[in-house]
Image (cartoon, grey):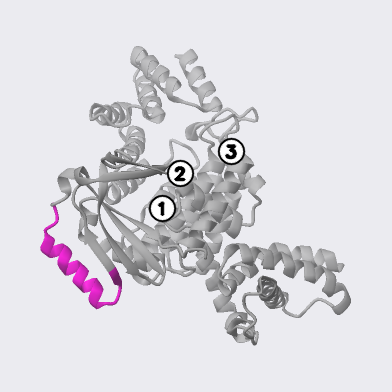
Amino acid sequence: MDVPETVARVYETESRRVLATLIRLLGDFDTAEEALHDAFRAALEQWPREGVPANPRSWLVSTGRFKAIDARRRMKRFDALDDVGEKADVGVIDHAAWADAESVEDDRLRLIFSCCHPALAPEAQVALTLREVCGLTTEEIARAFLSPAPTLAQRIVRAKGKIRDAKIPYQVPEANELGERLDAVLRVIYLVFNEGYAASSGTALTRGDLSAEAIRLARLLVELMPDEPEASGLLALMLLHESRRKARATPEGDVILLDEQDRSLWNREQIEEGSRLVERALELRRRPGPYTIQAAIAAVHAQATTSAGTDWSEIVGFYDLLLAREPSPVVELNRAVAVAMRDGPAEGLRIVDAILARGQLTDYRLAHAARADFCRRLGKTRDARASYERALMLTKQEPERRFLERRLREL
Amino acid sequence: MKYLCLVYLEDSKFTAVPDDECFACGQALRDSGTLLAAEPLYPVNTATTVRVRNGRTTVMDGPFAETKEALAGFYLIEARDLNEAIQVAAKIPPAREGSVEIRPVRQLNV
Protein backbone atom coordinates (compact mmCIF):
# COMPACT_ATOMS: atom_id res chain seq x y z
CA MET A 1 0.00 0.00 0.00
CA ASP A 2 1.45 3.40 -0.92
CA VAL A 3 1.61 6.23 1.56
CA PRO A 4 -1.32 8.39 0.35
CA GLU A 5 -3.47 5.28 0.55
CA THR A 6 -2.26 4.62 4.07
CA VAL A 7 -3.02 8.21 5.03
CA ALA A 8 -6.52 7.87 3.58
CA ARG A 9 -7.07 4.67 5.54
CA VAL A 10 -5.78 6.22 8.75
CA TYR A 11 -8.10 9.18 8.14
CA GLU A 12 -11.05 6.84 7.91
CA THR A 13 -10.26 4.87 11.05
CA GLU A 14 -8.60 7.49 13.25
CA SER A 15 -9.71 11.00 12.30
CA ARG A 16 -12.69 11.09 14.71
CA ARG A 17 -10.57 9.85 17.61
CA VAL A 18 -7.85 12.37 16.82
CA LEU A 19 -10.43 15.16 16.58
CA ALA A 20 -12.02 14.18 19.91
CA THR A 21 -8.66 14.37 21.66
CA LEU A 22 -7.65 17.61 19.93
CA ILE A 23 -10.88 19.27 21.09
CA ARG A 24 -9.94 18.42 24.67
CA LEU A 25 -6.35 19.60 24.27
CA LEU A 26 -7.18 22.80 22.39
CA GLY A 27 -10.50 23.56 24.05
CA ASP A 28 -12.34 24.57 20.90
CA PHE A 29 -14.10 22.72 18.07
CA ASP A 30 -13.01 24.99 15.23
CA THR A 31 -9.37 25.15 16.29
CA ALA A 32 -9.35 21.36 16.67
CA GLU A 33 -10.84 20.83 13.20
CA GLU A 34 -8.24 23.07 11.65
CA ALA A 35 -5.50 21.28 13.59
CA LEU A 36 -6.84 17.93 12.39
CA HIS A 37 -6.56 19.01 8.77
CA ASP A 38 -3.11 20.49 9.30
CA ALA A 39 -1.98 17.21 10.89
CA PHE A 40 -3.18 15.14 7.93
CA ARG A 41 -1.65 17.59 5.50
CA ALA A 42 1.65 17.19 7.35
CA ALA A 43 1.26 13.40 7.22
CA LEU A 44 0.87 13.52 3.44
CA GLU A 45 4.09 15.53 3.21
CA GLN A 46 6.21 13.80 5.82
CA TRP A 47 5.24 10.13 5.83
CA PRO A 48 6.52 9.42 2.28
CA ARG A 49 9.89 10.87 3.34
CA GLU A 50 10.17 9.68 6.92
CA GLY A 51 8.03 6.57 6.85
CA VAL A 52 4.68 5.92 8.55
CA PRO A 53 5.07 6.39 12.33
CA ALA A 54 4.61 3.41 14.61
CA ASN A 55 1.61 5.02 16.27
CA PRO A 56 -0.08 7.20 13.66
CA ARG A 57 -2.79 8.36 16.06
CA SER A 58 -0.46 9.90 18.62
CA TRP A 59 1.70 11.33 15.83
CA LEU A 60 -1.40 13.06 14.43
CA VAL A 61 -2.53 14.34 17.82
CA SER A 62 0.87 15.70 18.70
CA THR A 63 1.38 17.25 15.25
CA GLY A 64 -2.11 18.78 15.22
CA ARG A 65 -1.64 20.18 18.70
CA PHE A 66 1.75 21.60 17.82
CA LYS A 67 0.44 23.23 14.64
CA ALA A 68 -2.48 24.83 16.49
CA ILE A 69 -0.26 26.20 19.25
CA ASP A 70 2.20 27.45 16.67
CA ALA A 71 -0.59 29.20 14.77
CA ARG A 72 -1.89 30.74 17.98
CA ARG A 73 1.59 31.97 18.86
CA ARG A 74 2.10 33.51 15.43
CA MET A 75 -1.30 35.17 15.64
CA LYS A 76 -0.33 36.68 18.99
CA ARG A 77 2.94 37.99 17.62
CA PHE A 78 1.01 39.40 14.69
CA ASP A 79 -1.36 41.13 17.06
CA ALA A 80 1.72 42.42 18.92
CA LEU A 81 -0.31 42.01 22.09
CA ASP A 82 1.75 39.51 23.91
CA ASP A 83 5.48 39.07 23.76
CA VAL A 84 5.86 38.35 27.43
CA GLY A 85 7.48 34.98 26.79
CA GLU A 86 5.63 31.79 25.99
CA LYS A 87 2.56 30.68 27.81
CA ALA A 88 2.70 27.47 29.78
CA ASP A 89 0.57 25.59 27.24
CA VAL A 90 3.14 25.91 24.48
CA GLY A 91 5.79 24.18 26.58
CA VAL A 92 6.57 20.50 26.68
CA ILE A 93 4.29 18.24 24.73
CA ASP A 94 3.47 15.70 27.33
CA HIS A 95 2.79 12.38 25.66
CA ALA A 96 1.56 10.56 28.72
CA ALA A 97 -1.46 12.83 29.14
CA TRP A 98 -3.20 11.74 25.98
CA ALA A 99 -1.35 8.79 24.55
CA ASP A 100 -2.99 6.06 26.61
CA ALA A 101 -5.92 4.31 25.03
CA GLU A 102 -8.26 4.94 27.93
CA SER A 103 -8.20 8.73 27.81
CA VAL A 104 -8.58 8.62 24.03
CA GLU A 105 -11.74 6.52 24.37
CA ASP A 106 -12.95 8.94 27.04
CA ASP A 107 -12.46 11.75 24.56
CA ARG A 108 -14.82 10.05 22.14
CA LEU A 109 -17.46 9.84 24.87
CA ARG A 110 -16.84 13.48 25.80
CA LEU A 111 -17.43 14.41 22.16
CA ILE A 112 -20.70 12.45 21.97
CA PHE A 113 -22.04 13.94 25.19
CA SER A 114 -21.06 17.48 24.17
CA CYS A 115 -22.77 17.15 20.79
CA CYS A 116 -25.92 15.82 22.48
CA HIS A 117 -25.96 18.39 25.29
CA PRO A 118 -29.56 19.30 26.20
CA ALA A 119 -28.70 23.03 26.02
CA LEU A 120 -28.42 22.60 22.23
CA ALA A 121 -31.53 22.51 20.06
CA PRO A 122 -32.54 18.93 19.15
CA GLU A 123 -31.93 19.48 15.40
CA ALA A 124 -28.53 20.93 16.24
CA GLN A 125 -27.68 17.91 18.40
CA VAL A 126 -28.39 15.61 15.47
CA ALA A 127 -26.49 17.69 12.92
CA LEU A 128 -23.50 18.21 15.20
CA THR A 129 -23.28 14.52 16.11
CA LEU A 130 -23.32 13.47 12.46
CA ARG A 131 -20.75 16.12 11.60
CA GLU A 132 -18.30 15.74 14.49
CA VAL A 133 -18.74 12.17 15.73
CA CYS A 134 -19.50 10.44 12.42
CA GLY A 135 -17.48 12.75 10.19
CA LEU A 136 -20.25 13.30 7.62
CA THR A 137 -19.92 16.44 5.55
CA THR A 138 -22.49 19.21 5.88
CA GLU A 139 -23.66 18.44 2.33
CA GLU A 140 -24.19 14.76 3.18
CA ILE A 141 -26.22 15.64 6.27
CA ALA A 142 -28.27 18.18 4.33
CA ARG A 143 -29.05 15.63 1.62
CA ALA A 144 -30.06 13.00 4.16
CA PHE A 145 -32.40 15.38 5.97
CA LEU A 146 -33.71 16.94 2.76
CA SER A 147 -32.82 20.40 3.99
CA PRO A 148 -30.70 23.08 2.29
CA ALA A 149 -26.97 22.84 3.03
CA PRO A 150 -26.65 26.49 4.16
CA THR A 151 -29.38 25.90 6.78
CA LEU A 152 -27.53 22.85 8.07
CA ALA A 153 -24.19 24.67 8.04
CA GLN A 154 -25.66 27.56 10.00
CA ARG A 155 -27.19 25.20 12.54
CA ILE A 156 -23.78 23.60 13.13
CA VAL A 157 -21.97 26.95 13.34
CA ARG A 158 -24.50 28.23 15.87
CA ALA A 159 -24.23 25.11 18.00
CA LYS A 160 -20.44 25.32 18.05
CA GLY A 161 -20.72 29.00 18.94
CA LYS A 162 -22.95 28.17 21.88
CA ILE A 163 -20.61 25.43 23.10
CA ARG A 164 -17.79 27.97 23.05
CA ASP A 165 -19.55 31.09 24.38
CA ALA A 166 -21.82 29.52 26.99
CA LYS A 167 -18.98 27.16 27.91
CA ILE A 168 -20.63 23.77 27.56
CA PRO A 169 -17.99 21.57 29.20
CA TYR A 170 -16.17 18.82 27.32
CA GLN A 171 -16.80 16.00 29.73
CA VAL A 172 -18.66 12.79 30.38
CA PRO A 173 -21.50 13.61 32.79
CA GLU A 174 -21.11 12.58 36.39
CA ALA A 175 -22.94 9.57 37.75
CA ASN A 176 -25.87 11.58 39.15
CA GLU A 177 -26.81 13.02 35.78
CA LEU A 178 -25.50 10.26 33.52
CA GLY A 179 -28.89 8.55 33.14
CA GLU A 180 -30.66 11.61 31.83
CA ARG A 181 -27.79 12.66 29.61
CA LEU A 182 -27.43 9.17 28.17
CA ASP A 183 -31.15 9.25 27.31
CA ALA A 184 -30.48 12.37 25.24
CA VAL A 185 -27.65 10.62 23.36
CA LEU A 186 -29.81 7.55 22.71
CA ARG A 187 -32.64 9.81 21.51
CA VAL A 188 -30.33 11.47 18.98
CA ILE A 189 -29.10 8.11 17.69
CA TYR A 190 -32.64 6.74 17.38
CA LEU A 191 -33.77 9.90 15.61
CA VAL A 192 -30.99 9.51 13.05
CA PHE A 193 -31.98 5.88 12.59
CA ASN A 194 -35.66 6.63 12.11
CA GLU A 195 -34.93 9.42 9.69
CA GLY A 196 -33.08 6.83 7.62
CA TYR A 197 -35.60 4.05 8.16
CA ALA A 198 -38.87 5.76 7.38
CA ALA A 199 -38.66 9.24 5.95
CA SER A 200 -41.45 11.35 7.44
CA SER A 201 -42.01 13.02 4.08
CA GLY A 202 -40.91 12.71 0.48
CA THR A 203 -40.91 9.75 -1.84
CA ALA A 204 -38.08 7.58 -0.52
CA LEU A 205 -39.24 5.14 2.14
CA THR A 206 -35.76 4.32 3.35
CA ARG A 207 -32.53 6.23 3.42
CA GLY A 208 -30.13 3.52 4.39
CA ASP A 209 -27.01 5.56 4.96
CA LEU A 210 -28.46 7.34 7.97
CA SER A 211 -29.62 4.08 9.52
CA ALA A 212 -26.20 2.55 9.00
CA GLU A 213 -24.64 5.63 10.60
CA ALA A 214 -26.97 5.34 13.61
CA ILE A 215 -26.10 1.67 14.03
CA ARG A 216 -22.41 2.52 13.86
CA LEU A 217 -22.90 5.21 16.52
CA ALA A 218 -24.76 2.82 18.81
CA ARG A 219 -22.01 0.23 18.35
CA LEU A 220 -19.47 2.81 19.40
CA LEU A 221 -21.56 3.70 22.45
CA VAL A 222 -21.93 0.03 23.45
CA GLU A 223 -18.20 -0.40 23.05
CA LEU A 224 -17.51 2.67 25.20
CA MET A 225 -20.22 1.98 27.80
CA PRO A 226 -20.60 -1.81 27.89
CA ASP A 227 -22.47 -1.74 31.20
CA GLU A 228 -25.31 0.50 30.02
CA PRO A 229 -28.17 -1.86 29.14
CA GLU A 230 -30.16 0.76 27.24
CA ALA A 231 -27.26 1.37 24.84
CA SER A 232 -27.28 -2.35 24.02
CA GLY A 233 -31.09 -2.27 23.91
CA LEU A 234 -31.10 0.53 21.37
CA LEU A 235 -28.48 -1.17 19.20
CA ALA A 236 -30.53 -4.38 19.32
CA LEU A 237 -33.73 -2.53 18.43
CA MET A 238 -32.15 -0.88 15.40
CA LEU A 239 -30.50 -4.10 14.18
CA LEU A 240 -33.80 -5.96 14.44
CA HIS A 241 -35.65 -3.25 12.50
CA GLU A 242 -32.84 -3.03 9.98
CA SER A 243 -32.96 -6.81 9.44
CA ARG A 244 -36.35 -6.36 7.74
CA ARG A 245 -35.28 -3.57 5.40
CA LYS A 246 -35.25 -5.71 2.24
CA ALA A 247 -38.63 -7.22 3.01
CA ARG A 248 -40.57 -4.13 4.01
CA ALA A 249 -41.05 -2.53 0.59
CA THR A 250 -41.53 -3.62 -3.01
CA PRO A 251 -38.86 -2.60 -5.55
CA GLU A 252 -41.27 0.23 -6.47
CA GLY A 253 -41.17 1.44 -2.89
CA ASP A 254 -44.63 0.20 -1.84
CA VAL A 255 -45.12 -0.71 1.81
CA ILE A 256 -45.32 -4.38 2.75
CA LEU A 257 -46.77 -4.93 6.23
CA LEU A 258 -45.10 -7.27 8.69
CA ASP A 259 -47.62 -10.07 8.24
CA GLU A 260 -47.18 -10.05 4.45
CA GLN A 261 -43.39 -9.83 4.36
CA ASP A 262 -41.25 -12.55 2.79
CA ARG A 263 -39.40 -13.62 5.91
CA SER A 264 -36.67 -15.34 3.94
CA LEU A 265 -35.50 -11.82 3.03
CA TRP A 266 -34.89 -10.95 6.68
CA ASN A 267 -31.21 -10.59 7.54
CA ARG A 268 -30.43 -13.54 9.83
CA GLU A 269 -27.09 -12.16 10.96
CA GLN A 270 -28.64 -8.93 12.20
CA ILE A 271 -31.46 -10.85 13.89
CA GLU A 272 -29.02 -13.07 15.72
CA GLU A 273 -26.86 -10.19 16.85
CA GLY A 274 -29.92 -8.17 17.89
CA SER A 275 -31.42 -11.07 19.83
CA ARG A 276 -28.13 -11.70 21.64
CA LEU A 277 -27.92 -8.03 22.62
CA VAL A 278 -31.51 -8.00 23.93
CA GLU A 279 -30.81 -11.00 26.10
CA ARG A 280 -27.71 -9.35 27.50
CA ALA A 281 -29.55 -6.08 28.14
CA LEU A 282 -32.36 -7.95 29.91
CA GLU A 283 -29.80 -9.69 32.11
CA LEU A 284 -28.04 -6.42 32.99
CA ARG A 285 -31.04 -4.84 34.64
CA ARG A 286 -34.05 -6.22 36.42
CA ARG A 287 -36.30 -3.37 35.25
CA PRO A 288 -35.53 -3.10 31.53
CA GLY A 289 -35.68 0.34 29.89
CA PRO A 290 -37.91 1.33 26.97
CA TYR A 291 -35.39 0.60 24.20
CA THR A 292 -34.67 -2.86 25.60
CA ILE A 293 -38.39 -3.65 25.85
CA GLN A 294 -39.03 -2.48 22.29
CA ALA A 295 -36.07 -4.56 21.14
CA ALA A 296 -37.49 -7.57 22.98
CA ILE A 297 -40.77 -7.10 21.07
CA ALA A 298 -38.89 -6.88 17.77
CA ALA A 299 -36.95 -10.02 18.72
CA VAL A 300 -40.15 -11.99 19.29
CA HIS A 301 -41.35 -10.95 15.83
CA ALA A 302 -37.97 -11.86 14.32
CA GLN A 303 -38.00 -15.33 15.84
CA ALA A 304 -41.41 -16.26 14.39
CA THR A 305 -41.38 -18.05 11.04
CA THR A 306 -44.90 -16.84 10.19
CA SER A 307 -47.16 -14.03 11.35
CA ALA A 308 -49.66 -16.57 12.72
CA GLY A 309 -46.85 -18.40 14.51
CA THR A 310 -45.85 -15.24 16.42
CA ASP A 311 -46.08 -15.44 20.19
CA TRP A 312 -48.59 -12.58 20.47
CA SER A 313 -49.13 -13.16 24.20
CA GLU A 314 -45.48 -12.52 24.84
CA ILE A 315 -45.63 -9.37 22.72
CA VAL A 316 -48.69 -8.08 24.60
CA GLY A 317 -46.80 -8.80 27.83
CA PHE A 318 -43.86 -6.66 26.71
CA TYR A 319 -46.24 -3.85 25.71
CA ASP A 320 -47.77 -3.99 29.20
CA LEU A 321 -44.26 -3.60 30.60
CA LEU A 322 -43.56 -0.69 28.25
CA LEU A 323 -46.84 1.04 29.16
CA ALA A 324 -46.03 0.71 32.85
CA ARG A 325 -42.67 2.41 32.25
CA GLU A 326 -43.74 5.08 29.80
CA PRO A 327 -47.47 5.52 29.42
CA SER A 328 -48.22 6.91 25.97
CA PRO A 329 -51.18 6.65 23.58
CA VAL A 330 -48.85 5.53 20.75
CA VAL A 331 -47.65 2.57 22.82
CA GLU A 332 -51.31 1.84 23.69
CA LEU A 333 -52.09 1.80 19.97
CA ASN A 334 -49.27 -0.64 19.25
CA ARG A 335 -50.46 -2.81 22.10
CA ALA A 336 -53.96 -2.75 20.57
CA VAL A 337 -52.56 -4.19 17.34
CA ALA A 338 -50.91 -7.04 19.26
CA VAL A 339 -54.07 -7.64 21.30
CA ALA A 340 -56.06 -7.82 18.06
CA MET A 341 -53.72 -10.57 16.88
CA ARG A 342 -54.06 -12.47 20.14
CA ASP A 343 -57.77 -11.95 20.94
CA GLY A 344 -59.24 -10.89 17.58
CA PRO A 345 -59.90 -7.52 15.87
CA ALA A 346 -62.98 -6.66 17.99
CA GLU A 347 -60.77 -6.31 21.06
CA GLY A 348 -58.28 -4.15 19.13
CA LEU A 349 -61.08 -1.92 17.87
CA ARG A 350 -62.39 -1.47 21.40
CA ILE A 351 -58.99 -0.19 22.59
CA VAL A 352 -58.43 2.17 19.63
CA ASP A 353 -61.91 3.63 19.97
CA ALA A 354 -61.25 4.22 23.66
CA ILE A 355 -58.05 6.13 22.83
CA LEU A 356 -59.79 8.22 20.17
CA ALA A 357 -62.74 8.85 22.51
CA ARG A 358 -60.29 10.42 24.98
CA GLY A 359 -59.39 12.89 22.23
CA GLN A 360 -55.92 11.38 21.81
CA LEU A 361 -54.23 10.43 18.49
CA THR A 362 -57.15 11.93 16.54
CA ASP A 363 -54.69 13.41 14.03
CA TYR A 364 -52.32 10.44 14.06
CA ARG A 365 -52.55 8.65 10.70
CA LEU A 366 -51.55 5.25 12.06
CA ALA A 367 -54.38 5.28 14.63
CA HIS A 368 -56.91 5.61 11.82
CA ALA A 369 -55.09 3.09 9.64
CA ALA A 370 -55.17 0.56 12.51
CA ARG A 371 -58.84 1.25 13.16
CA ALA A 372 -59.57 0.79 9.45
CA ASP A 373 -57.76 -2.54 9.47
CA PHE A 374 -59.71 -3.84 12.48
CA CYS A 375 -63.01 -2.79 10.86
CA ARG A 376 -61.99 -4.42 7.57
CA ARG A 377 -61.24 -7.69 9.34
CA LEU A 378 -64.59 -7.47 11.15
CA GLY A 379 -66.42 -6.90 7.85
CA LYS A 380 -67.50 -3.38 8.88
CA THR A 381 -66.83 -2.00 5.41
CA ARG A 382 -68.37 1.44 5.91
CA ASP A 383 -66.41 2.15 9.08
CA ALA A 384 -63.25 0.81 7.45
CA ARG A 385 -63.69 3.12 4.47
CA ALA A 386 -64.17 6.20 6.68
CA SER A 387 -61.03 5.41 8.69
CA TYR A 388 -58.88 4.67 5.61
CA GLU A 389 -59.99 7.99 4.15
CA ARG A 390 -59.12 9.81 7.36
CA ALA A 391 -55.67 8.14 7.44
CA LEU A 392 -55.15 9.05 3.79
CA MET A 393 -55.90 12.69 4.56
CA LEU A 394 -53.26 12.70 7.29
CA THR A 395 -50.37 10.92 5.56
CA LYS A 396 -47.61 12.88 3.87
CA GLN A 397 -45.66 9.90 2.63
CA GLU A 398 -46.12 8.74 -0.95
CA PRO A 399 -45.67 4.95 -0.45
CA GLU A 400 -48.05 5.02 2.51
CA ARG A 401 -50.61 6.87 0.43
CA ARG A 402 -50.42 4.20 -2.28
CA PHE A 403 -50.82 1.47 0.34
CA LEU A 404 -53.93 3.09 1.83
CA GLU A 405 -55.41 3.70 -1.60
CA ARG A 406 -54.89 0.04 -2.48
CA ARG A 407 -56.63 -1.04 0.72
CA LEU A 408 -59.54 1.29 -0.04
CA ARG A 409 -59.93 -0.19 -3.53
CA GLU A 410 -59.88 -3.72 -2.14
CA LEU A 411 -62.71 -3.07 0.33
CA MET B 1 -17.08 32.37 34.07
CA LYS B 2 -20.00 34.67 34.90
CA TYR B 3 -23.58 33.76 34.06
CA LEU B 4 -26.70 35.85 34.46
CA CYS B 5 -29.71 33.80 35.51
CA LEU B 6 -32.85 35.70 34.51
CA VAL B 7 -35.98 34.72 36.37
CA TYR B 8 -39.20 34.89 34.34
CA LEU B 9 -42.66 34.63 35.87
CA GLU B 10 -46.24 35.19 34.81
CA ASP B 11 -47.74 38.27 36.45
CA SER B 12 -49.93 36.19 38.72
CA LYS B 13 -46.93 34.21 39.97
CA PHE B 14 -44.78 37.18 41.00
CA THR B 15 -45.37 36.55 44.68
CA ALA B 16 -45.84 32.79 44.44
CA VAL B 17 -42.50 32.07 46.08
CA PRO B 18 -42.22 33.47 49.62
CA ASP B 19 -39.51 36.14 50.06
CA ASP B 20 -37.99 34.13 52.92
CA GLU B 21 -37.23 31.29 50.57
CA CYS B 22 -35.62 33.57 47.97
CA PHE B 23 -33.58 35.22 50.71
CA ALA B 24 -32.37 31.84 51.99
CA CYS B 25 -31.43 30.74 48.47
CA GLY B 26 -29.44 33.92 47.88
CA GLN B 27 -27.75 33.55 51.24
CA ALA B 28 -26.74 29.95 50.56
CA LEU B 29 -25.34 30.84 47.13
CA ARG B 30 -23.47 33.82 48.62
CA ASP B 31 -21.96 31.60 51.33
CA SER B 32 -20.72 29.11 48.74
CA GLY B 33 -19.05 31.93 46.81
CA THR B 34 -21.27 31.39 43.76
CA LEU B 35 -23.39 34.53 43.94
CA LEU B 36 -22.14 37.91 42.74
CA ALA B 37 -25.47 39.75 42.85
CA ALA B 38 -29.18 39.03 42.95
CA GLU B 39 -32.25 41.24 43.04
CA PRO B 40 -35.99 40.77 42.67
CA LEU B 41 -37.95 43.21 40.51
CA TYR B 42 -41.36 44.88 40.79
CA PRO B 43 -43.93 43.52 38.32
CA VAL B 44 -43.92 44.54 34.71
CA ASN B 45 -46.65 47.21 35.08
CA THR B 46 -43.98 49.38 36.74
CA ALA B 47 -41.69 49.14 33.71
CA THR B 48 -40.64 52.12 31.60
CA THR B 49 -38.93 51.82 28.24
CA VAL B 50 -36.40 54.38 27.03
CA ARG B 51 -35.16 54.75 23.47
CA VAL B 52 -32.81 57.25 21.86
CA ARG B 53 -33.34 57.93 18.14
CA ASN B 54 -31.56 60.67 16.25
CA GLY B 55 -30.46 62.14 19.55
CA ARG B 56 -34.03 62.34 20.82
CA THR B 57 -35.05 60.42 23.90
CA THR B 58 -38.48 58.85 23.92
CA VAL B 59 -40.01 57.34 27.03
CA MET B 60 -42.83 54.82 27.01
CA ASP B 61 -44.87 52.93 29.50
CA GLY B 62 -44.38 49.19 29.69
CA PRO B 63 -41.92 46.68 28.35
CA PHE B 64 -40.88 46.49 24.74
CA ALA B 65 -42.32 43.05 24.08
CA GLU B 66 -45.60 41.78 25.46
CA THR B 67 -45.04 38.19 26.54
CA LYS B 68 -46.78 35.90 28.98
CA GLU B 69 -43.79 35.70 31.31
CA ALA B 70 -41.91 38.81 32.37
CA LEU B 71 -38.54 39.41 33.96
CA ALA B 72 -39.01 39.08 37.70
CA GLY B 73 -35.46 39.15 39.02
CA PHE B 74 -31.91 38.06 38.38
CA TYR B 75 -28.96 36.20 39.86
CA LEU B 76 -25.46 36.99 38.67
CA ILE B 77 -23.34 33.96 39.44
CA GLU B 78 -19.84 32.64 38.99
CA ALA B 79 -19.71 29.08 37.66
CA ARG B 80 -17.09 26.78 36.17
CA ASP B 81 -19.16 26.02 33.07
CA LEU B 82 -22.72 25.79 31.79
CA ASN B 83 -23.35 22.51 33.61
CA GLU B 84 -22.57 24.13 36.94
CA ALA B 85 -24.69 27.16 36.01
CA ILE B 86 -27.61 24.84 35.18
CA GLN B 87 -27.27 23.20 38.59
CA VAL B 88 -27.39 26.59 40.31
CA ALA B 89 -30.33 27.78 38.19
CA ALA B 90 -32.29 24.66 39.08
CA LYS B 91 -31.96 25.64 42.76
CA ILE B 92 -33.46 29.11 42.26
CA PRO B 93 -36.94 28.77 43.86
CA PRO B 94 -39.03 30.50 41.13
CA ALA B 95 -37.70 27.94 38.63
CA ARG B 96 -40.60 25.77 39.74
CA GLU B 97 -43.18 28.55 39.12
CA GLY B 98 -41.81 30.11 35.93
CA SER B 99 -38.50 29.73 34.15
CA VAL B 100 -34.86 30.74 34.48
CA GLU B 101 -32.92 31.80 31.43
CA ILE B 102 -29.15 31.39 31.66
CA ARG B 103 -26.99 33.79 29.67
CA PRO B 104 -23.19 33.72 29.63
CA VAL B 105 -21.72 37.13 30.46
CA ARG B 106 -19.63 38.55 27.63
CA GLN B 107 -16.37 40.43 28.04
CA LEU B 108 -16.46 43.84 26.39
CA ASN B 109 -14.14 43.84 23.40
CA VAL B 110 -11.98 46.81 24.40
> Reading the chain from its start, which is encountered first: label 2 or label 1?
1
Dot 2: what SS? helix
> Reading the chain from its start, which is encountered first: label 2 or label 3?
3
Amino acid beneath label 1 = Tyr
Query: Relative to B53, is A350 above or below?
Result: above
Tag 1, which chain? A
Tag 2, which chain? A
Which residue in the protein does label 1 denote?
A291
* Residue A156 in view here: yes
Q: Is residue B17 magenta?
A: yes
Q: Are marks 1 and 3 on the same chain?
A: yes
Q: Nearer the viewer, residue A360 or A85?
A: A85
Dot 3: what SS? loop
- Side of A400 where A382 appears, left or right: left
Amino acid beneath label 2 = His
Dot 1: what SS? helix
**Number of other residues with Cα within 10 Å of mark 1, as a class: few under 14, some 14 to 19, many 20 or more:** many
Which residue in the protein does label 3 denote?
A147
Query: Relative to A403, is A151 above or below?
Result: below
Q: Residue at x 75, y 80 (%)?
A: A54
Q: Quadrant of the N terminus of chain B?
A: bottom left
Label 2 and label 3: CA atoms lie apart by 35 Å
Which residue in the protein does label 2 denote?
A301
Q: Which mark is residue A210?
A: none
